[in-house]
Amino acid sequence: MAPKQRPKLDLDPAAVRQARRLARQAGKPIVDLAKKHTTVSVERATLRLAGLQGADADGTPWVNRLLEAVRADVGIEHGVALPVWDALVRCEADDLSVLAQKASAGSVRFRLPEGRDETRARSAARKAVGAGVRRMDARRKERERLVQRWGDPQQKPWIYLIVATGDIYEDIPQAQQAAREGADVIAVIRSTGQSLLDYVPEGATREGFAGTYATQENFRLMRAALDESSKELGRYVRLTNYASGLCMPEIAALAGLERLDMMLNDSMYGILFRDINPIRTFVDQRFSRQVHARAGIIINTGEDNYLTTADAVEAAHTVTVSQLLNEYFAKEAGLEDWQLGLGHAFEINPDLPDSFRMELAHALLARQLFPNAPLKWMPPTRHMTGDVFRGYMLDAFFNLVGTLTGQGILLVGMMTEAVVTPWLSDRDLALQNVRYVLNAAGNLHEDFQPAPDGFINQRARQVLAESIDLLERILAHESKTGLLDAIADGTFGLMKRPADGGRGLDGVARKSPAYYNPASEILEEK
Amino acid sequence: MEVVSTGSTTREESTVKEGQILRPYGDTTGDGMVQLSFTLPISSLGQHAKIAEGAAAQLANKMGIDPAMVVHAKAMGPDFTFFVVYGRVNHLVDTSKVQVVERDYPLLSPKEVNLAIRKGLRRRMVVVGGCIGTDAHTVGIDAILNIKGFAGEKGLEYYREIKVVNLGAQVSVPQLVERAKAEKADAILVSQVVTQRDAHIHNTKEMSAAFREAYPRDKQPLLIVGGPRFDENMAGELGVDRVFARGTTPGEVASYLVDQLVTHRPPRSERKAS
């Protein structure tokens, strides 16, 4: 994806290898732990892949109703697939949707099938879920075809803009206008609070708080609108949403089915910033990333968030460590380099001397550690005040770092950050800023080579060394899952999150020996 | 704040007391110059350009800017135009009529805060904080509570004599009340950033009502809300003891807590029931 640049930094290759090895050592026990558990959301995502849609009169999705019925009879530790398709094979209902309705009325009893019954349930489940995976495959091919026809953006980085009105029918014209003005990627910000809902709302939604609910229908409507825009503009406009919170696996599946192009999907964000149980998060993470890998979706990780709560200079290495962990978890789940929109942000206090040089050093470090990943570069928020003029200048410097260090995805900064949700004019001015800087700087990166032992190189090496140090401290924790302990004692973003606390823990179950999930089986075959 | 009259004031002092008459300052005293920018849903493409600029000037005139110079008009797509306008306003500002909430408590250093609590309360002060409702933006509450702090000041966690219980994001009101009781909280700190559909107002009123219900009037903890879009004059309407607006620092909050809970430790029944 990214045009490969000559390395700008003089990093010790042994140190880079060591950092990756430590990240793998820290991440491996977490993956093992994730493999041993399932969650309500993973099981519901499986039902969604098998085509179960819709909700009851109260708005509770049928996947939730069916899952709860299964859970009441046999628990979720065996997975939903065997009990559900056993019931279908036994002709309790003609299809999943009727089964869900009968189950919630209490007229179906579920059991864990054995012997021949198990074999039959297993193959029926695999067939149904396999059809869903093939639908995702078809959407991926469709994307590839459309990108071929309409083309990718002409410039790097891709320009990423946010819309957030709460009303999908208001979001659509805003998104189309943003695309016309130059946005290559549109993100529809989610309603606050959705991350803590243990179900995915249904249908087109017109009310939300500071954002719009992620629903399958909203996904479909917005993707269709951006297909129109892509056709009009002669470039493929990408759509982003959030696979995070308690329903991460389900939202990932819906994104795959509706051809979303990028998903926010961080391995630790939910734990640290939403107080979701760590095990729940890691299990959901792994499944959702397997889905993204299959669907050809680019993930965006959330390292920028660490810097909004901790100091961007002191905590620079926590970003690097998180990027390394995100990379490990992503690759383990089957994602490829071009799908890793690893995050980082321009959040150093602008009053510090050499703040711009440090920003350059950090951005170059990320670029060089992950040369083939389309890094996601996030604008200043923490040091944006009501002074919109100063904010506009900071955003210009942010844009300059973006183009000078070959970032893949640039989230456009708004001068009215911390003041209002962006106005039409804010967005227009912000895009002028991006265009000016990208155009004026041109291929400046070709001429830009930091002095081998200069400030930038030294700073980058220091951050890398601190990252290695932190990873070693994580591994020094007594238990095998040192990362969980590190999260529990507040190593990241200053938040303390014990493994037995947080939301959604009651939706986690240790897999039984009889556990079967056709989605995981198919997704892990590749 | 009461100003004590000394009887013999100089001319300047009395001017300050009675207020000053001001005009905006561009580059000369009294020139009244202001700048503003706005968008009108009007096309400025082709033959529409003149009408669009005229429309912008008309708006500026109606706002009291005369003459109005439309120095910049930029079409944003076919339907919208962005304007920058400079001009003179004819309004006068009378500072004696400005209403603000003055800081009515002394500002203390962390050391002084700790000392005051130790001497006056003889135990640690307990502060329970969080973001209520669906608000997930902990940036405000964290700035005040986390040791990291804000604007160069350390947060309340840094104060030895203050026990901080930060419940974080998306705390429900019943959870907050329950925890407040369990911790025997002296003060509740709530941050509200999201303001869509006045969520911050509704949430705060719900919160204060819940505390009124859960506690006898003289036992209720001090209720404090903060957030960038709150009006500091709204405390009574919201049913809280204090509203802090944008830019409030941890030191200010700590000083206020000492003032209310130690220095003026009120017979709680005197507090307004509103």
Image (tube, rainbow, N blue to C red):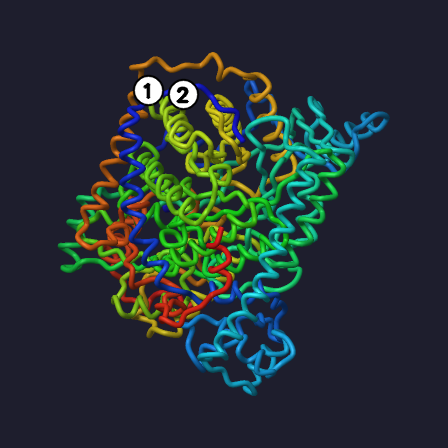
Q: Chain of mark 2?
A: A
Q: Under tag 1, what secondary structure?
A: loop
- Which of A310 and B36 lies nearest the eye of the viewer? A310
- Which of A432 and B153 lies nearest the eye of the viewer? A432
Residue B237: percent from the left, percent from the top? 48, 60
* Figure check: A230 above or below A5: below
- For the N terminus of chain A, the image quarter is top right
Q: Is B85 on the left or on the right of A261, as rendered?
A: right
Q: Amino acid at mark 2?
A: Pro
Q: Amino acid at mark 1?
A: Asp
Which residue matches tag 1?
A10
Labels 1 and 2 touching (C-beta < 8 A): yes
Which residue matches tag 2?
A7
- What mark, if any, has residue A257 been given in the picture? none
Residue B47 occupies which quadrant of the picture?
top right
Mark 1, other Cα within 10 Å: few <14 / some 14–19 / many ≥20: some
Query: Which residue reaches farthest right?
Result: B47
Q: Chain of mark 1?
A: A
Q: Residue at x 53, y 36 (%)?
A: A411
Q: Is A323 on the left or on the right of A212, as rendered?
A: left
Residue A268: percent from the left, percent from the top? 38, 50
